[in-house]
Image (spheres, rainbow, N blue to C red):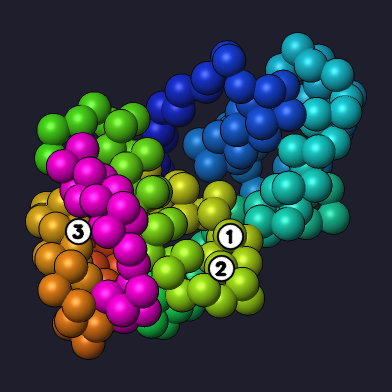
Amino acid sequence: MELKLVFKNDRSRPASHQSYEMLRDKILNGELPGGTKITEEKLAAELGVSRTPIRESIRKLEYEGLIVNKKVVKPTEKDLRHMFQVRILLEGYSAQCAASYLQENELNALHECVEIGKKGTVDEIMDANEQFHEIIVKASNNPVMIDIIDRMQSTIYLFRKTVVFYNRPHLIDEHEDIYNAIQARDGQKAEELMKQHLQADLDFCLHLIGD
């Protein structure tokens, strides 16, 4: 099944960031399918910006792996499995670290993400979901791990949107369970729950793709 998602752009953001989001969304929505050649002049005209923010956007998307040699790369099922294997390993470890190292204010922020997930709008839940995982990944205090996850952000964004937009069962309940384990300083349980959580995300996305 082809996923067609709707993304909102914040006009108050800088042109470079706005252009990046618009270009990324065109790729993730399939408006720019895999193999499409990226032309700065054409995109600048379509998005109504100068070539400078477009050039910066392309550079960032190349860093994140969505554009290679000025062409769009479309993540395959194999790419998805590989990405989640990495996330399961790194974010599982990060959850263990979070149980040891998160400070009270960070725990409060993590809890707030869970609460927003229960009652927020789709956009609010998206932001809270991203922040929830970001807080935990940063708890690793490992810049190499953080950089690896950062490189996958565009693809992660697509599948995060998928699980929120299609209301994956127990998504927020799992976040709450992870939070409770971290708050209880139970690193082993937090790690296992995070791994199960990401595996459930993967299974859900693969099921949608296969329909």
Q: CA distance from mark 2 to mark 1?
A: 6 Å
Query: In this rendering, is residue 117 above or below 77?
Result: above
x, y percentage for residue 154? 56, 50
Q: CA distance from mark 3 to mark 1?
A: 20 Å
What residue is shown with label 3? 175
Marks 2,1: beta carbons within 8 A: yes
Q: CA distance from mark 3 to mark 2?
A: 20 Å
Q: Which residue is pictured at 79% across the width and 16% down the height?
A: 49
Return the disc, 3 or 2, that comes first in the chain's sequence: 2
Mark number, residue 146: 2
Q: Nearer the viewer, residue 38 or 182?
A: 182
Identify the element where label 2 is drawn: helix
Q: Which residue is pictured at 63% across the width and 76% down the height?
A: 144
Identify the element where label 3 is drawn: helix
Marks 3,1: beta carbons within 8 A: no
x, y percentage for residue 6? 41, 27
What residue is shown with label 1? 150
Q: In the rendered structure, which amino acid carries the disc numbered 3?
A: His
Q: Nearer the viewer, residue 41 or 30?
A: 41
Left or right: residue 40 compared with residue 136: right
Q: Which residue is pictured at 66% across the width and 56% down the height?
A: 64
x, y percentage for residue 53? 80, 29
50 within the magenta span? no
Query: In this rendering, is residue 89 above or below 210?
Result: below
Q: In the rendered structure, which amino acid carries the disc numbered 2?
A: Ile
Query: In this rendering, is residue 17 above or below 155?
Result: above
Classify residue 42 by image quadrant: top right
The magenta segment: 96-116
